[in-house]
Image (cartoon, helix red, strand yellow):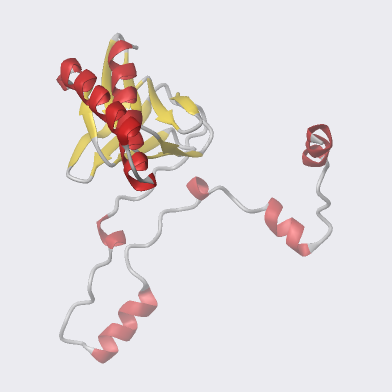
Amino acid sequence: MFRHAAKLLRRPVPTTSPAAAAVSRRPFSSDLPAAETADPAFVEAWKKLIPNIDPPKTPLSFMQPRPATPASIPTKLTVNFVLPYASELSAKEVDMVIVPATTGQLGVLPGHVPTIAELRPGLMSVHDGNDVTKYFVSSGFAFIHANSFADIIAVEAVPIDRIDANLVQKGLAEFTQKVNSASTDLEKAEAQIGVDVHSALNSALTG
């Protein structure tokens, strides 16, 4: 079955139809120009209705233009690492970043193909020359763009050297006991989440 699926994936798509031709001409999102900071039609309509008040600003008004995709692969990967309450890395140029994706550890180098990866609890490492900075992330997403930019958004993250190994072992033992003594499916599910997170913390510390 998988061999037949692979043959279908390799089968050339005819471009005689207008729909197929449109698909073949569709650019990647990172190849498109950055969106305008204001919609001219909206601004014109606003000024007609309320000429004495400036139009409201949208989030696009505060966003920087999207960097163009370089013709050649750059030597550095530009990383933005953001938490709900802080910006850990902002436009940091590094050699590589490794994130804990749900499909496994994902290494990102300059020139990586555009990818969206969901993050699981685990170790994230940022490599810049001989310096390696390690974080434990709880969950989130990594957006890798064609222009060698990577945006990593985590729900929670902490530098690995700030984690107390004794507290991790204590928490793992407590949640393991809760799993064994759970009387309902909800209690067992909640305890299992604690086991999974503390197991990931332990692996990050010992790995």
- The picture places residue 154, in percent across and down from the top left corner, at 30, 39
- The image quadrant that residue 183 belongs to is top left
Residue 69, position as x, y percentages in the image: 48, 39
Q: Quadrant of residue 188?
A: top left
Q: Residue lying furthest top in this view?
A: 130
Q: Residue at x 32, y 38 (%)?
A: 182
> How many badges with numbers are in the image?
0
Image quadrant containing the N terminus = top right
Judge whether 96 appears above or below 23 on screen. Answer: above
User: Can residue 177 be seen from the camera position used here?
Assistant: yes
Front residue of 200/161: it is 200
Q: Residue at x 39, y 35 (%)?
A: 150
Which residue appears at 22% of the width and 21% of the height?
168
Q: Name the quadrant of the C terminus.
A: top left
In this rendering, is residue 36 above or below 7? Answer: below
- Would residue 137 appear left or right of 18 to someone viewing this image? left
User: 51 and 23: which one is in front?
Assistant: 23
Residue 92, compared with residue 186, is above or below; it is above
Residue 30 in the figure: left or right of residue 4: left
Q: Above or below — where is 101 with respect to 133? A: below
Q: Residue at x 75, y 57 (%)?
A: 20
Position of residue 206 measured from the top left corner of the image (x, y, whole percent): 30, 11
Q: Is residue 160 left or right of residue 107?
A: left
Q: Nearer the viewer, residue 202 or 42?
A: 202
**Residue 109: horizontal and vertical position, in percent?**
45, 24
Q: Is residue 138 visible?
A: no
